[in-house]
Each structure stands twice: as C-alpha cells, then as structure tokens.
Amino acid sequence: MKGIYKEIKESIVALGGHYTKSIYVMLEDGSIANINIKGSGVQSWGDFTQKTRSRLSDEWIEVANAIELKKGKVNYSIPEFKFATSLNDSQSKMADDAYNKLKSYIDGYLSKQIEVKDEEVIDDNDISDLF
C-alpha cells in the first residue's frame, strides 16, 4: 500500500500488517545491515535521534541495553540506544563507501515499477544479493 500511514493504517492492520522502521547500519567490518523495529522500539529510536541527529553520521551507536517494561499484563522490552565512540578517519571512509553503495541500491530499487496482485507475497526486505 502507498500513502500516509495514519490514513491507511486501518487497512494495513486489517491485513495483519504493522508499521516497521527500517534502519540501515554499517557494522565494524564495513558491511551493511538492516535493523527493523516496531512498536515502542520505534519511539525509542525516535527519541534518541531527535535529540542527537547531528551526531549520527560520525559516531558509533550501540544498543546498550534492553529496557524491560510492562503495560497491563503485557511484558515487553525496548532498545536503549547510546553513542559509543567517534569514527576514526578510516571508519569514516568506510561509512562513506557504505552509504554510496546503499544509496545506489536504493535509488535503483525505487526506480523500478512493480505491479503486485493482492494474493502475491513479495519479500522486498531481501537485499542480501547487494552485500
């Protein structure tokens, strides 16, 4: 589905879907990984990035902890994001290279016109052939 989430949310939920935040990250070896978070984890990421947006491109970020919470009878956890250390010059170059590789892939992916029938299931999260 395409559209503004709050306008199409009911249709998505009716089909068993939910909002997921996709975060692309560079690992210490320069490889790229994708982290998908949903629910309260999205809020945790949003709170972290809202306050620290200017630092995101030049520092290592770690999931330092899982914060255990409870709402009613439901127990759940959310990630606690923290800055680790600043990128050194070679890591910064690796990050630039990883960004350019990912940007090239995403630009190509988004330029494709894909027709999907209601009964088809397409795993558009599989980008393993890129890496």
Image: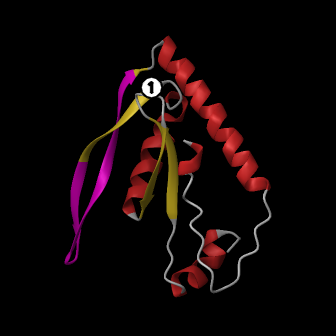
Q: Amino acid at mark 1?
A: Glu
Describe residue 79's horizontal placement relative to residue 108 as left or right: left
Q: Residues within 10 Å of mark 1 (few under 14, many from 20)?
A: some
- Quadrant of residue 104 within the rendered picture: top right
Classify 131 as above or below 75: above
In the rendered image, residue 78 lying in the magenta stretch gets the answer yes
- The residue segment tinted magenta is 66-85
Percent position of residue 121, x then y: 58, 77
Percent position of residue 99, x then y: 61, 33
Find numbered disc 1 in the image and state the secondary structure of the residue it sits on: strand
Q: Quadrant of the C terminus?
A: top right
Looking at the picture, tell me which residue is in the foreground, 107 or 16: 107
Describe residue 67's horizontal placement relative to residue 8 as left or right: left
Q: Which residue extends farthest top?
A: 89
The residue positioned 60% from the left and 62% from the top of the image is 124
| Magenta-drawn stretch, dominant element (helix, strand or loop) | strand
The residue identified by callout 1 is 59
The residue positioned 19% from the left and 78% from the top of the image is 73
- Quadrant of residue 96 within the rendered picture: top right
- Quadrant of residue 42 within the rendered picture: bottom left
The residue positioned 53% from the left and 23% from the top of the image is 94
